[in-house]
């Protein structure tokens, strides 16, 4: 199993026929309030999610802003004036890329802006599971008397951590894990052999593993930090889960669908692995009803995609996506173009 490398394309840079001050834009996700006010200073008209019926909005929209929701093929086809979709975040699997290519619509992202926030959440989830924090908290709130000898936990110090992917989040997480004296193993076959050459200057060391299966067999913690696409869909399924240690845990702060959720349920219920912490889901927005049995088990931590949800990261990322779109409309180039 290999991780994909995005194809390189010679993208022609189009020029917009409208200036930012004359543009109508649609914020299709919840944006930071300060960023929404900032957008009103940059564009002629800013439409929020519930301001108008969707079809009426799309008919007049020249730019769409996006965080957690998705832009479907149907939406794009109903947007005759649409020129650009500006995504706050690194992943763009929530945009129907093929339709954008067909219609010549630009797609941009904001990579790396949430790396610190997602890395600290991944670390927090590891600590939560490996010290049984949420599990014991729930029991105490229900009135149970807890003796510490009955809730012994593995802890994080000196554990072997397996990371899938070598992006900004993996880098920041590796630095955090160095404090816990963890051994870091990485599976990222499409990354350059020379990537992370400066890791020792950041006071952590790592080892590259050439096989996903070999990585999985060795680790106490498996943490996923790769994109979702055809190659990574169900990357972690029954066969991979069966290779994991019975006292190991899995963390996913990347994208729902990389782990087969039903196979994970089976592994947890049958004690094939110690626990799992998920911030991303096959169905989003996620609720306890969409999460299935994973929301009911004692050995899981479940969150509704909060990885980048810190005050600073939310505002800066939303504002950066606004600046990217405004610069495009004003003929200043296209920053972080992915399509």
Image (cartoon, rainbow, N blue to C red):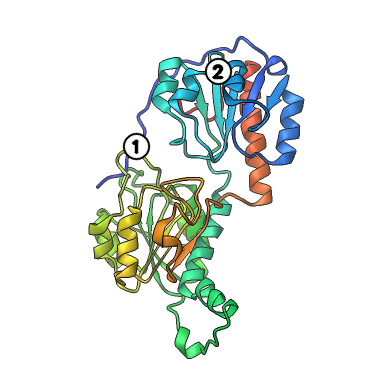
Horizontal arrangement in the rendering, residue 103 relative to residue 41 (left or right): left
Q: Which residue is mark 1?
A: 5
Q: Are marks 2 and 1 in contact (CB under 8 Å)?
A: no
**Mark 2 vs mark 1, CA separation in Å:** 28 Å
Q: Is residue 317 above or below residue 298?
A: above
In the image, residue 18 lies at what x, y percent? 64, 12
- Image quarter for residue 316? top right
Query: Mark 2 falls on what kind of element?
Result: loop
Residue drawn at point x = 54 percent, y = 59 percent: 121
Q: Is residue 1 above or below residue 110?
A: below
Q: Nearer the viewer, mark 2 or mark 1?
A: 2
Question: Number of numbered discs present?
Answer: 2
Query: Mark 1 falls on what kind of element?
Result: loop
- Image quarter for residue 214? bottom left
Residue drawn at point x = 53 percent, y = 30 percent: 336
Q: Nearer the viewer, residue 179 or 120?
A: 120
Residue 69, can we see it?
A: yes
In the image, residue 66 lies at what x, y percent? 57, 34
Q: Nearer the viewer, residue 173 or 88?
A: 88
On residue 55, the disc is: none
Q: Nearer the viewer, residue 34 or 165?
A: 34
Q: Which residue is mark 2?
A: 82
Q: Residues within 10 Å of mark 1 (few under 14, many from 20)?
A: few
Q: Nearer the viewer, residue 151 or 294?
A: 294
**Quarter of the C terminus within the rendering:** top left
For marks 2 and 1, the one nearer the N-term is: 1
Residue 202, can we see it?
A: no
Horizontal arrangement in the rendering, residue 251 relative to residue 312 (left or right): left
Q: Residues within 10 Å of mark 2 (few under 14, many from 20)?
A: many
Residue drawn at point x = 53 percent, y = 39 percent: 111
């Amino acid at each position: 199993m290999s991780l994909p490398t995005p194809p390189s394309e010679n993208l022609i840079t189009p020029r917009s026929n409208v200036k930012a001050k004359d543009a109508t834009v649609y914020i299709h996700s919840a944006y930071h309030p300060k960023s929404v006010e900032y957008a009103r200073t940059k564009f002629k008209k800013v439409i929020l999610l519930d301001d108008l019926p969707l079809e009426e909005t799309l008919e007049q929209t020249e730019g769409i802003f996006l965080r957690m929701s998705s832009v479907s093929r149907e939406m794009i086809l109903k947007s005759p004036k649409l020129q650009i979709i500006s995504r706050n975040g690194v992943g763009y699997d929530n945009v129907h890329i093929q339709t954008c290519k067909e219609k010549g619509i630009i797609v941009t992202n904001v990579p790396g802006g949430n790396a610190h926030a997602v890395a600290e959440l991944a670390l927090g989830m590891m600590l939560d599971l490996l010290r049984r924090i949420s599990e014991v908290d729930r029991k105490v709130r229900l009135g149970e008397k807890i003796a510490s000898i009955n809730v012994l936990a593995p802890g994080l110090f000196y554990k072997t951590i397996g990371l899938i992917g070598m992006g900004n989040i993996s880098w920041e997480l590796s630095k955090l894990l160095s404090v816990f004296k963890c051994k870091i193993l990485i599976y990222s076959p499409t990354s350059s052999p020379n990537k992370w050459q400066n890791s020792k200057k950041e006071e952590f060391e790592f080892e590259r593993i050439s096989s996903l299966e070999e990585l999985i067999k060795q680790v106490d913690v498996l943490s996923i930090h790769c994109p979702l696409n055809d190659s990574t869909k169900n990357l972690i399924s029954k066969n991979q889960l069966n290779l994991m240690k019975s006292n190991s845990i899995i963390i996913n702060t990347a994208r729902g669908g990389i782990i087969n959720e039903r196979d994970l349920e089976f592994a947890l219920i049958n004690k094939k692995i110690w626990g799992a912490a998920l911030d991303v889901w096959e169905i989003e927005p996620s609720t306890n009803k969409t999460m299935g049995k994973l929301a009911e088990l004692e050995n899981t931590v479940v969150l509704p995609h909060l990885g980048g949800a810190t005050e600073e990261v939310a505002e800066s990322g939303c504002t950066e996506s606004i600046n990217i779109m405004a610069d495009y409309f004003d003929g200043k180039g296209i920053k972080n173009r992915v399509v």
